[in-house]
Amino acid sequence: MKCPVCGEDVDMFDICDNCGWQNDGPEEKETNLKGPNKMTLKEARKAYKSGIKVV
Ligand SMILES: [Zn+2]
């Protein structure tokens, strides 16, 4: 699947090598904070664009 943050290829539930986002699968919601990431998907996309590390 594609990383929802940076668009690179990443395995489902794996941490993206490119941006550090951990993928929760295809059902991931933009504002969901329940996953392993400390950022929401929305925040992570913004951070990635700004050159901030995704956590
Ligand atoms: Zn990524």
Image: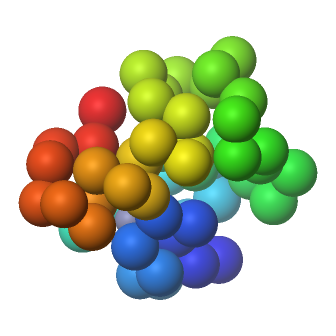
Instruction: State the quadrant of the C terminus.
Output: top left
Above or below, 51 relative to 6: above
Residue drawn at point x = 64 percent, y = 21 percent: 33
Number of on-image labels: 0
- Asked whether residue 4 is in view, the answer is yes
Q: Residue 27 versus residue 49: which sits nearer the camera?
A: 49
> Which residue is rendered at x = 37% and y = 55% of the image?
46
User: Ligand 1: which quarter?
Assistant: bottom left
Q: Residue furthest right?
A: 27
- Residue 20 seen by the camera: no
Instruction: Give the left or right position of residue 25, taking residue 33 as reference.
Output: right
Above or below: residue 43 compared with residue 7: above
**In x, y percent, where is residue 44?**
41, 47
Q: Where is residue 23 in the image (x, y as percent from the top left)?
A: 58, 49
For the rendered model, the colour scheme is rainbow
Please indicate whether residue 36 sits to the left or right of residue 52 in the image: right
- What residue appears at the point 55 percent right and 48 percent down from the top-left corner? 42
- Quadrant of image for the N terminus: bottom right
